[in-house]
Amino acid sequence: MCVRRSAIFDVFVDFDRELRETIRSFLHALEYVDALYHIQCAGETSFVLENSLFGRIIETLKKGALYISDEERLDLERKIDHLARGIYDLCSITLRRKGEDYIDLTIGKIFSPDKNYRRYYSGVIGVINKSFDSLIRAYDEKMDFSLGSLPIPEEYKGSFIRGNVPVMRCIDVLSFAGELNIRHKPICVFFSGGGSENLSTLSMVTVFINVYVRRFELISREIARRYIENYSIIEDLDYKTTAGLLLLWLRGHDIGHFYGVDSLEKMMSELDRTYLILHELKSDMVALYNLRCLADDLLRGDMLAKAYMVSISEMFRYIRRDRFYNYADTASAFLAYMYFKESGSVEFDVRTKKFRINLSKLEEDIENLNTNLLRIFAEGDMRGATELVNRWGDIKELGQHSFPHELRVLEDADIPHYIDLNFTIKDRVLDLD
């Protein structure tokens, strides 16, 4: 049996002393979120108890707002009052400092695939990171060109509206709570910010950029180092370059959810496992296809090859989560791998126990799989959808007990499965004791 361990990384933050009590209130609010979550998990929640604890969140935040300047206090109090009206999915409160967004606190409920897609209390606090805003904008400016070049019939493309794509921002996470604090830490969260919650109205996405990058460095890159023959191309990636490559893929994935005609949803429930898995796979392939359209600017030189290698390394990390039927993103990674293996762009050398990636063949396979997926969605091809999901075995059984064949090398117990944060206040500017 594979032993699954966590790697811990340190988060150091040097806060302005004047924000001490306000940030303390944010952290205390997360403690109440954790209390609500554990009560939910124990099945002991009630309307009265839930309202009482939610009221304490509001009370705690309002007390924290009293310690900052008048202008910033009024701005924060307006946001707290909005939160006090109730949460449909998630609500983000931003603490501003000297006219700039500084700290994000996001709390509310998210769907849990581990708990039959019921909604559970969750929260996260982080320092807003604007370092990658220009990169995200540059990608978005290439969006129409990238999607327009997809080799599919015009009637499959539909009318893509750029404004439907969620607004993306990055934060450096300090602490998680509730369903966001599970062992398999998320890299981002989508939410509507108060509107009705469904796939087409999730208008915001917050990326946990420090968690995303450190998880890649501690897990995905280690998988690549040990088990991908062409690993050396990403061996020396620095933090900022790694973050940029991951964000380019993730932004393309976000866009992929909103691209193409979707007649399949009319034939299936939006929460049907087959539908969810294929939606993830379609988005993954759109993201991978779009990378080649950045080769003349954002991914010049060997950066495109690095982007592919980063994506393949992430694919193997997702597969390690196993139980493919339970997690749509994990099933998507498995199906992508099996397709690439069958088509020849990914090969496993039984002698060296390493995977070999043919990057030029990979581009061809990405295009072909992308085309087929967009057709399945556009035509509402339920039979094609089911056949693709179960093409290499019953997806309900695959990954439940062990990995098939060569993928068992991914069970390597020396490579962490999870990461955890050790939040430390730099220079003891903020005393939380």
Image: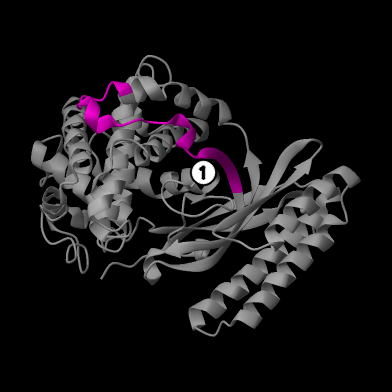
Residue furthest bottom as drawn: 44
- The answer to whether residue 297 is above or below residue 47 is above
Left or right: 425 with respect to 254? right
Q: Looking at the image, which is closer to me, 118 or 335?
A: 118
Left or right: 47 with respect to 396? right
Residue found 24% across the figure and 25% down from its top: 154
Q: Position of residue 401 (x, y in %)?
A: 20, 69
**Image-quadrant location for residue 304:** top left
Residue furthest top as drawn: 296
Q: Looking at the image, which is closer to me, 42 or 24?
A: 42
**Image-quadrant location for residue 59:** bottom right
Q: Position of residue 377 (x, y in %)?
A: 23, 43
Residue found 10% across the figure and 45% down from its top: 351
The quadrant of the image that shows the N terminus is bottom left
Left or right: 115 with respect to 86? left
Q: Looking at the image, which is closer to me, 142 or 240?
A: 142
Q: Position of residue 175 (x, y in %)?
A: 61, 58
Can residue 145 be seen here? yes
Total label count?
A: 1
- The answer to whether residue 337 is above or below residue 159 is below
Magenta-colored stretch includes residue 168: yes
- The answer to whether residue 420 is above or below residue 229 is below
**Image-quadrant location for residue 125:** bottom right
Residue found 84% across the figure and 49% down from its top: 73
Q: How is the image coloured?
A: one colour
Magenta-colored stretch includes residue 18: no
| Residue under label 1 | 203
Residue found 29% across the figure and 64% down from its top: 326
Point out the stretch of residues depicted in magenta.
Answer: 148-172
